[in-house]
Amino acid sequence: MRRILPLILTVLLSSSCGIVRFGSSELFTAGPAIRQDYTPKGIVEERFYPCSVPGPSQRRLIAYLPADYYTSGKDYPVIYLLHGARGYETSWVRFGEVYHTADSLWAQGKAVPCIIVMPNVNQYNDDRDYGESRFKNAFESIFEVDGIVESAFMDDVVGYVDSVYRTVPQKSHRAIAGLSIGAYQAIYFGTNYPDAFDYFGIMSPYMWCLGHPSITRHRFFSHMRRRMKVQFQDPPKGYYLYAGTWDMARPSTERLDRFMTRKGFPHVYTVYPSSHDWPTGWKEEFKDFLQHAFQEP
């Protein structure tokens, strides 16, 4: 059963992980960074950053800045939001209502104003294949998680953001969150770079990701438990696990919760009345996570 479970979950992923509107033309490109049904109160910026690994020469990321970013003179903490299979850099905008949530919580004083960065972490062969963040189906996304994009994330994405924005380039002022495969990636960013992030939002982690059996993949996605022990020698200030009541990734999330509890790794595990999807799941989980990031003692 364990051997076929990843394949079953892969099939189920074809109807979730961020893209559920099969009949829409918006399915095939990442599209604009601002939705027509909401005018953000903050500043939305599209940036193209150079890539240092095989694939496209550059990629787009979406950055959401507090409204007073260019007048405040302040340095800001950063949250990196990762999409799931079938997703791209605008998935959190289209389906996760990131702008709505941040605007509301910032206005109420319930969340720390920060820079929210949404990159594209899919693998593409070259510039032509990338083609404005080309849509990828679930099988393509899952089997191409090979560690190449992930191994360059700290330099290509985090390093770039630190170079163009007024950030606080310290662990205590960085957070990373993701859903499904994005959660899987976020877990490994934490274990591979224990001094990089202090806040984690791990939403429905897809823990049986099948990517290419390459050397790069082995170097990046391996020895999670051993590396997590090193990571928690100086524990993150906030480590939040989330899953839905009917979530296909709930079993793997609960196994991670049990492992972390058994080892004494401080974390919080919350179950929402949802499935492996947006409306009452990832959208609400991000709302909860944003209220914790950068506020733990």
Image: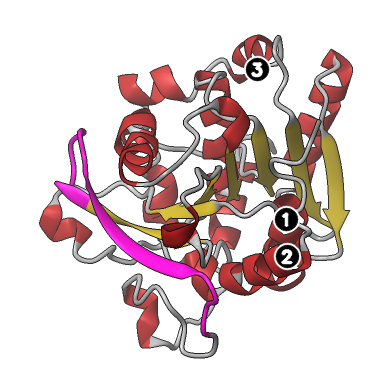
Q: What residue is rendered at 75% in x and 64% in y? A: 284
Position of residue 92 measured from the top left corner of the image (x, y, whole percent):
53, 65
Check disc 3 and report the residue beneath it. 228
Residue at disc 1, secondary structure = loop
Earlier in the chain: of badge 3 and badge 2, it is 2
Kindly check if marks 3 and 2 are in contact, taking CB atoms under 8 A apart as contact.
no
Look at the image and give the residue range highlighted in magenta: 39-58
Contact between marks 2 and 1 (CB within 8 A): the answer is yes
Nearest the viewer among 73 and 33 is 73
The residue drawn where x is 47% and y is 82% is: 35
The amino acid marked with disc number 3 is: Met
Amino acid type of the residue tagged 2 in the rendering: Leu
Number of the label disc, if any, that sits on residue 105 = 2
Residue located at (80% from left, 20% from top): 265
Above or below, 3 relative to 292: above
List x then y, in percent, for residue 40: 52, 77
On whether residue 40 falls in the magenta region, the answer is yes
Badge 2: few (under 14), some or many (20 or more) residues near its Cα, within 10 Å?
Answer: some
Nearer the camera: disc 1 or disc 3:
1
As measured in the structure, the alpha-carbon distance from the residue carrying label 1 to the one carrying label 3 is 28 Å
N-terminal label among 1 and 3: 1
Residue 87 visible in the snapshot: no
Task: Report whether residue 237 is seen.
Answer: yes
Q: Is residue 285 left or right of residue 222?
A: right
What amino acid is labelled 1 in the image? Ala
Q: Which mark is residue 111?
A: 1
On screen, 43 above or below 165? Answer: below
